[in-house]
Amino acid sequence: MKTQNLGSIIITIALIFFALLLVFDSFSYIPAQQMIPLIVAVFTLVCLFATLGVDLFSKRPADDSISNKSPEDQSWSSILPLFGWIILYLIFIFILGFTLANFIFVFTYLLKRAKLYWPKAIIFTVIVTAAMYGFFNLGLNVDLWPGIVPETIPKILGGGNLPPL
């Protein structure tokens, strides 16, 4: 077996040890505080083990993880649109609330940036939004920010109070 990218494998293994430390450390918390570190660390471990498996057993050629371009060759034209997406997402969360902003953001991102056809984008958007709503509202019992618009759908759209500045 030829190692594809030794640096990537070493970093992935280090991150696996860090995530395992989080799992073991979370058991020292009271049960109400254990849930979030466990969920995040276990999900992270699944992703890291998948990444390690791809790095170790993939037959694809190694990718350069560091760009060989000089700083003069790199432009802001590829970075600025991403900043725009992030800023719009944060504005939508503030105004429309997390659930609706998440739905709109994922759907438009899949249409515009990922170039998916709208039926696939709708299906994936509904799955992602339902999973996030279920994870936070039902699983963790955390009410997400509903937005500053007048309350339309209780606890989902509108009715949020601005904190005092």
Image (cartoon, rainbow, N blue to C red):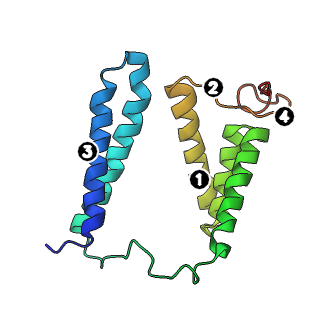
Q: Secondary structure at mark 2?
A: loop
Residue 3, compared with residue 103, is above or below; it is: below
Q: Nearer the viewer, mark 1 or mark 3?
A: 3
Amino acid type for the residue under numbered disc 3: Phe
Q: Which residue is mark 4?
A: 149
Q: Compute the Cα span from label 1 to label 2.
A: 24 Å
Q: Nearer the viewer, residue 58 or 2?
A: 2
Residue 17, disc: 3
Amino acid type for the residue under numbered disc 4: Val
The picture places residue 33, in percent across and down from the top left corner, at: 43, 21
Which residue is located at x 67 percent, y 39 percent? 99
For the residue carrying disc 1, how many other residues have a C-alpha within 10 Å: few (<14), some (14-19), or many (20+)?
few
For the residue carrying disc 2, how many other residues have a C-alpha within 10 Å: few (<14), some (14-19), or many (20+)?
few
Q: Which residue is mark 2?
A: 143
Q: Quadrant of the C terminus?
A: top right
Residue 123, disc: 1
Mark sitting earlier along the chain (3/2): 3
Q: Compute the Cα span from label 3 to label 2.
A: 32 Å
For the residue carrying disc 4, how many other residues have a C-alpha within 10 Å: few (<14), some (14-19), or many (20+)?
some
The answer to whether 2 appears left or right of 26 in the picture is: left
Mark sitting earlier along the chain (4/3): 3
